Amino acid sequence: MQKPILEVDGLKKYYDIKGGPLGRKVGEVKAVDDVSFMVMEGEILGIVGESGCGKSTTGKSILRLIEPTEGKVIFEDKDITNLKSEEMRKLRKDMQIIFQDPYASLNPRHTVEKIVGEPLLVHGMKSAKERQERVKELLEIVGLSPYHAKRYPHQFSGGQRQRIGIARALANNPKLIICDEPVSALDVSIQSQILNLMEELRDEFNLTYIFIAHDLSVVKHISDRIGVMYLGRMVELTDKDKLYDDPKHPYTQALLSAVPLPDPDLRKERLILTGDVPSPANPPSGCAFRTRCPHAMDICKEVRPEFYPVEDNHFVACHLYK
Ligand code: SF4
């Protein structure tokens, strides 16, 4: 039986909206609003949703790159929510992040050797020679050549730059990597190469990933389980196959029916979403999806649906299943 490596319990991230001549708080944006889930050791948990649904904020709050407003993050049975910055810095050896735009996240004035070697130095590898050796090894692991170590980020293609970002994340043998839209900025032809590399690395180094993306086909390619977010909340979470074969939440159904499928027999009845995504500064009462849901009932306006299991390993936040 797999055990959880990460537990996220009631995570919230609210941002104050300030206004008026005195800059007082006049409201708040609920970027992440009471999100709970577990990630098992060695699994790839995909988190999918439209832009602004809170998936990246969730990832960054887990690593405390953004401080959560409320909730708990438990990593390897240890509550890390209130760890002091020095303790958190040590823990980041085990918890890494890969960003969407490798170019923006790599210092253009540093060589690859310095970029990939920096986390080694931060976590105590003082010998320059040892670092050089480890950087060469890491470059080979991600499919680059050791001679690339002396080059600068602008001398690489987008896919190669993402490989450098992956090498840097792998430097200190992490256990969990949060992948924040890691292939969204790449050409489709390069995306699958990077996804395949990430899968190989997961198997080779027994890694666990949280894989954040807006593209359903990318998430499907790589994930074991998938969580769907809407307006700061997780609305459905289950195995990849269950989610694609039998989506329960009306929002998931709408997202999936919009994915083009080559085989017309496999195409689901198209469920068109009407209306815009409401503002997270002023979300609808009750179920956040009710203003766009074709099945909305009176209760949906009044009561926020719980996120509960409708069947084994299949969580949904919707009154239709109570
Ligand atoms: Fe639709 Fe109501 Fe379910 Fe929300 S709770 S998704 S409004 S049926």
Image (spheres, grey):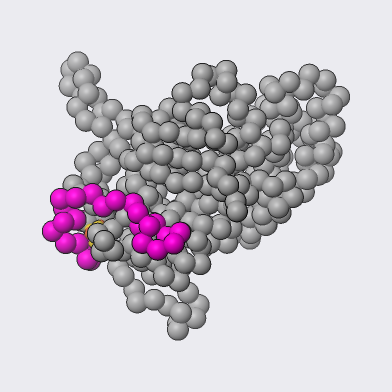
Residue 177 within the segment the image draws in magenta = no
Q: Does the image show residue 298? A: yes
Residue at image position (82%, 22%) is 128
Identify whether 243 is placed above or below 285.
Answer: below
- Quarter residue 255 falls in: bottom left
Left or right, 172 with reference to 71:
right
Please state the quadrant of the image where ligand 1 appears: bottom left
Residue 108: percent from left, percent from top = 65, 30
Residue 195: percent from left, percent from top = 63, 55
Numbered range of the magenta stretch? 291-316
Q: Does the image show residue 276? A: no
- Quarter residue 12 falls in: top left
Residue at image position (85%, 32%) is 133
Q: How many labels, in total?
A: 0
- The outermost residue toward the top is 22
- The outermost residue toward the bottom is 265
Residue 42: percent from left, percent from top = 63, 49
Identify whether 199 is placed above or below 110.
Answer: below
Which residue is at the front of the view, 4 or 92? Answer: 4
Residue 310 within the segment the image draws in magenta = yes
Residue at image position (26%, 32%) is 28
Q: Quadrant of the C terminus?
A: bottom left
- The outermost residue toward the left is 298
- Quarter residue 268 falls in: bottom left
Residue at image position (60%, 53%) is 1
Residue 100: percent from left, percent from top = 55, 43
